[in-house]
Amino acid sequence: MPSATAASAKTPPDKTPASAKAAKSRAAAPVLGVRALNRATLDRQLLLRRSALSAKDAVTHLLGLQAQNVKPPYYALAARLEGFAPEDLSRLMADREVVRIVTMRSTIHTHTADDCLTLRPLVQAARERELNVFRKGLAGVDLDRLAAVSRELVEAEPRTMKQLREALLAEWPDADPFALAVAARCRLPLVQVTPRGLWGRSGQVALTTAEHWLGRPAEPVPAPDATVLRYLAAFGPASVKDMQTWAGLTRLREVFERLRPELVTFRDEHGVELFDLPDAPRPDADTPAPPRLLPEFDNLLLSHADRSRVVPADLKGRTWQGNQAYRTFLVDGFLAGVWRHEEQVLTIEAFGTLTKAQRDEVVQEAGRMLAVMSGGTSYDIRFGTVIE
C-alpha cells in the first residue's frame, strides 16, 4: 500500500474547463504580424513566385476562381502560373473539366467538375437562405415543384435567364419573374454552358444543371472538414470568420474545434486566433514579393474577414466605385493601385508614390502579362488615371 506521503505526491486530476484551456492555448499562441500573414497568404495563392502547376491543378488548389466576368479567371492564372496560356483554361472548359457556377458568397466561380459537384452541395444551405429575401415575390410558389419544372426545362435544352423566367412565369403568373429565376438558380446547381467562358469566343449566359452537363450526379452534402483544410492550404493562416467570409457559411467554429488536434494556432496582432496546417509554408516576413497584376474580383482580396494582410487600412474600399470593381496590382505584396486595359493601352494608377525601381518592375510585370494574354500585339503601358 502506498504511503500517505506518496499518495499526496500524485498529480491531482486537471479539472480546468475545456474553454479555459482553449483560452490559455490561444494566449500562448505565437503572434503573426501583418507582413508574415501577407507572405504566407501570397505563397498559398501562388503569388510569391509563379507555380509550375497545370491550370486544372491550380484551379483545384485555389478552390476555384472568382468569375463574375469571363476574363478574370484567365488573368488570375496568368498572374500565378509559369507558362500559362489562356487556351489552357479554355480547353478545360470546352472539355467540361471546369465549369462556371454560383457557389461561395452567391457569386459565380470557375471550379473543376469535381469541386462543382461537392462544393455546391456544401453551400446549398446558404443558397436556400438566400431565398428568404424573395419570399414576397414567391408567395404561393411550391419551391420543390419549381425546382422540378426548372430542371426539366434546362435539361431539355440550355436556357437563358430570360427564357427561364418566361417559362416559369407561365406556371406561376402571379409571382415575381425575377424571384422565380433566382429561386431556380438557388434550388438547382446551374452551370453556364459553353461557349460562354471560352477564351476569345464566349456568348450569352445559357444554363443547364451540373449533373446534366457533366454526366454524373452531385455528391451528397459533405462534412465541411476537408474543405476547411483545403481553405487553409490556399488562404491560411486564417480565423474561423475568415473561412466563413470565403464560403458564405456560418457556424463553422465547431468544425475548427473538431480539427484543432490536427492544426497549429497563431494570433494576429489584435489577438484573433488563426488556424493553420502544421506543414504549410509560412515564409519570413521579409521574403521579397514581386509585383502582380490581378483581375477584378480576385479571391486574394475577397476571402478573409480581415483583409489587412493584403489591403492597407487607408486603401480599404479603393478598388470599388458603386457597382464597378477595378483590376488591382500588388507592390511588395500589398494592394498598391488599379489598372485598366483598353484597346492598345494599359493604364496603371498607383494609390501612392512608387519608387523608380517599383515603377519599372510594375511595367515589366504588365508587359509580361500582356505577352501572355495578348500574344504579339504591341501595347502602350502608361501611368495615369483609372478611377474617374
Image (spheres, helix red, strand yellow):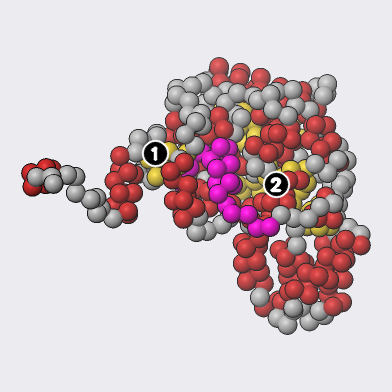
For the residue pair 371 and 145, the one nearer the viewer reads as: 145
> Can you say whether 158 is above or below 381 in the image?
below
Near mark 1 (Cα within 10 A), the count class, few <14, some 14-19 or many ≥20, is many
Residue located 78% across and 69% down the image? 147
- Tell me if 58 is positioned left or right of 343 in this view: left
Near mark 2 (Cα within 10 A), the count class, few <14, some 14-19 or many ≥20, is some
* Residue 317 percent coordinates (x, y): 54, 46
Where residue 266 is drawn, which disc sits there?
1
Residue that carries the numbered disc 2 in the rendered image: 115
- Residue situated furthest right in the rendering: 156
Q: Do the residues bearing badges 1 and 2 touch, measured as CB atoms within 8 Å? A: no
Residue located 53% across and 52% down the image? 244
Quarter of the image with the C terminus in it = top right
Q: Which residues are magenta?
A: 220-240
Where residue 304 is drawn, which disc sits there?
none
> Can you say whether 85 is above or below 181 in the image?
above
Label 1 to label 2: alpha-carbon separation: 29 Å
- Tell me if 56 is positioned left or right of 173 in this view: left
Marked residue nearer the N-terminal end (1 or 2): 2
Task: Tell me if residue 230 is in the magenta stretch.
Answer: yes
* Circle 1: element type: strand
- Tell me if 43 is positioned left or right of 29 in this view: right
* Residue 133 percent coordinates (x, y): 63, 70
For the residue pair 383 and 234, the one nearer the viewer reads as: 234
> Can you say whether 242 is above or below 346 in the image?
below
Task: Tell me if residue 15 is in the magenta stretch.
Answer: no
Residue located 9% across and 45% down the image? 3
The answer to which quarter of the image holds residue 102 is bottom right
Q: Amino acid at mark 2?
A: Asp
* Residue 257 percent coordinates (x, y): 44, 51
